[in-house]
């Protein structure tokens, strides 16, 4: 029997924080200041729907204001509660500091099942929730900037942005009050895929470090690695799609709420996603074996386990049976503190959520900057880049003709293409994920008392937050 006790999501985050702080030399009281949640606002509001008034409960938690604005998504789920929102806000604080996004941490949630409402009803509910937050400064370009999360999307963010603009008609930066918006409403290309793309970049960078790969009991690169994906929502879908189509991974199992699909030859991620959208689950999918017990498939033989849905799916109940040597945490908090202790002792290597899941907030940062600058990335310089490149290509062609050389068939087209917004977003995200992993790995390998990447990530993050507070005079 395990000697550790199972904890909830919020306690797991706090315990992981405390494990790292114990290895640091911080001024008295500062660790407590960094750990505790600054404030949580609870709102209960009514909306007239279907001939009756329905009351909803929502939350907006501000964990840390060492930097402002604070940043964090808004989720719609029947499981939303204050503890969950505060834990997610804490993770946002640490995540932003880790990837050097200049935000404090925040999070919001509304306790409802969005599938039970028509679109116009959801708009009414969202606008009223946004109104309650906006009038208290809990949605504001310079104070608190939400984004999509579980159960919400660009659609809800567009409603929130419009509600803010209606209430603040002279705010030139109104669009920057929220990120993850549709492109036509001030969004940025690449935001929808951002978290999944960040997971891919995290995996790629990990496999560039042979010493780290060996610690997981693996070898070689990403190509051919067998992956089990838990949750094919936005994050899981994009991560699985990119890893399979661009890196040559085999997605051998996809676990959903109604069971799992298994095919050792590799699943067609696009086909499975279409089936889920049309049928509401994986049951009946004709291209693979269906297992009704998805939890058992999570424990199956693979190279990489990619939990991409809810928190706490890896816990004391299954940690001893997890066979994957490498766990890539695409979701927030998928591993409880107790399970993390067991997995570490068993030699399982975890690429932690506060790093692997950071693609979304990184690209949200780019969108926020775009909204404040009022110009899309690449607009000023793209054609100038292409003009300079054309001069070089023309000179190369002249020299080639004189010497009998021949340029590669696609060289000219590739070289003459200037950087558009998507290229720049992906470049910025990849640079962020690569440099962040390198810093984590450096701490991991340079200190004998740091046993894993999660502790290294917390140490990097906490040190940056501590420095920010120190500069404020604390």
Image (tube, rainbow, N blue to C red):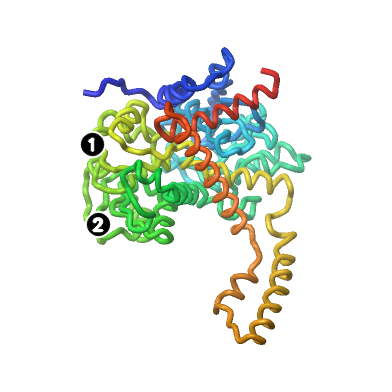
User: Which quadrant of the figure has residue 47?
Assistant: top right
- The x and y percentages for residue 79 are 40, 31
User: Which quadrant of the figure has residue 263?
Assistant: bottom left
Q: Is residue 291 above or below residue 68?
A: below
**Which residue is depicted at the point 49% across and 46% down?**
195
Total labels drawn? 2
Q: Report the front residue among 430 and 170.
A: 430
Looking at the rendered image, the quarter that the C terminus falls into is top right
Q: Report the front residue among 285 and 345.
A: 345
**Which residue is depicted at the point 60% across and 50% down?**
428
Q: Report the front residue among 366 and 185.
A: 366
Q: Is residue 462 above or below residue 152?
A: above
Looking at the rendered image, the quarter that the N terminus falls into is top left
Can the viewer see residue 54 in this picture?
no
- The x and y percentages for residue 200 are 45, 51
**In the rendered view, does 27 fall on the left or right side of 212?**
right
Give the distance between the C-alpha atoms of the residues marked 1 and 2, in whole angstroms.
Answer: 20 Å
* Residue at the top extreme, as displayed: 28
User: Which quadrant of the figure has residue 390?
Assistant: bottom right
Q: Residues within 10 Å of mark 2 (few under 14, many from 20)?
A: some
> Are circles 1 and 2 on residues that touch, CB within 8 Å?
no
Q: Secondary structure at mark 2?
A: loop
- The x and y percentages for residue 294 are 26, 43
**Which residue is depicted at the point 71% across and 78% down?**
395
Q: Secondary structure at mark 1?
A: helix
Q: Is residue 437 above or below residue 78?
A: below
Can the viewer see residue 418 in this picture?
yes
Q: Is residue 227 above or below residue 81?
A: below
- The x and y percentages for residue 473 are 70, 19
Q: Which mark is residue 321?
A: 1
Q: Which mark is residue 264?
A: 2
């Amino acid at each position: 029997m395990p000697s550790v006790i199972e904890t909830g999501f919020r306690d797991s985050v706090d315990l992981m924080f405390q494990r790292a702080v114990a290895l640091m030399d911080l001024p008295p009281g500062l660790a407590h200041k960094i750990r505790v949640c600054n404030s949580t606002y609870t709102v209960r509001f009514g909306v007239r729907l279907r001939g009756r008034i329905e009351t909803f409960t929502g939350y907006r938690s501000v964990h840390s204001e060492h930097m402002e604005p604070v940043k964090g998504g808004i989720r719609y789920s029947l499981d939303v509660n204050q503890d969950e929102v505060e834990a997610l806000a804490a993770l946002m604080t640490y995540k932003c500091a880790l990837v050097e996004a200049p935000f404090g941490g925040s999070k919001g949630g509304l306790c409802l099942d969005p599938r039970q409402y028509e679109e116009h009803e959801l708009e009414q509910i969202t606008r009223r929730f946004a109104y309650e937050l906006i009038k208290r400064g809990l949605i504001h370009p310079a104070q608190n900037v939400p984004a999509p999360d579980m159960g919400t999307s660009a659609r809800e963010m567009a409603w929130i942005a419009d509600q803010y603009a209606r209430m603040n008609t002279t705010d030139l930066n109104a669009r920057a009050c929220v990120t993850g918006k549709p492109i036509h409403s001030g969004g940025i290309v690449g935001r929808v895929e951002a978290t999944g793309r960040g997971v891919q970049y995290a995996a790629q960078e990990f496999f560039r470090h042979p010493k780290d790969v060996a610690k997981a009991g693996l070898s070689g690169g990403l190509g051919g690695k067998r992956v089990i994906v838990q949750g094919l929502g936005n994050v899981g879908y994009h991560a699985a799609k990119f890893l399979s189509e661009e890196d040559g991974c085999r997605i051998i199992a996809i676990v959903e709420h109604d069971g799992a699909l298994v095919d050792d030859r590799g699943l067609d991620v696009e086909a499975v996603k279409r089936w889920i959208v049309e049928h509401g689950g994986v049951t009946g999918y004709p291209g693979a074996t269906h297992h009704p017990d998805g939890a058992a498939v999570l424990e199956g033989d693979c190279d990489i386990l990619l939990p991409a849905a809810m928190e706490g799916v890896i816990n004391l109940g299954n940690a001893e049976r997890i066979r994957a040597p490498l766990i890539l945490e695409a979701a927030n908090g998928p591993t409880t503190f107790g399970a993390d202790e067991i997995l570490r002792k068993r030699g399982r290597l975890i690429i932690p959520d506060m790093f692997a899941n950071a693609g979304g907030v990184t690209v949200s940062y780019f969108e926020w900057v775009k909204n404040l600058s009022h110009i899309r990335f690449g607009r000023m310089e793209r054609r100038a880049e292409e003009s300079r490149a054309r001069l070089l290509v023309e000179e190369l062609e002249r020299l080639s003709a004189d010497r009998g050389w021949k340029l590669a068939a696609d060289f000219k087209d590739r070289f003459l293409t200037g950087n558009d917004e998507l290229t720049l977003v992906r470049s910025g995200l990849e640079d962020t994920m690569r440099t962040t992993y390198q810093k984590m790995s450096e701490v991991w390998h340079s200190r004998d008392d740091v046993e894993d990447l999660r502790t290294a990530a917390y140490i990097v993050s906490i040190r940056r937050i501590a420095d920010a507070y120190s500069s404020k005079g604390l």
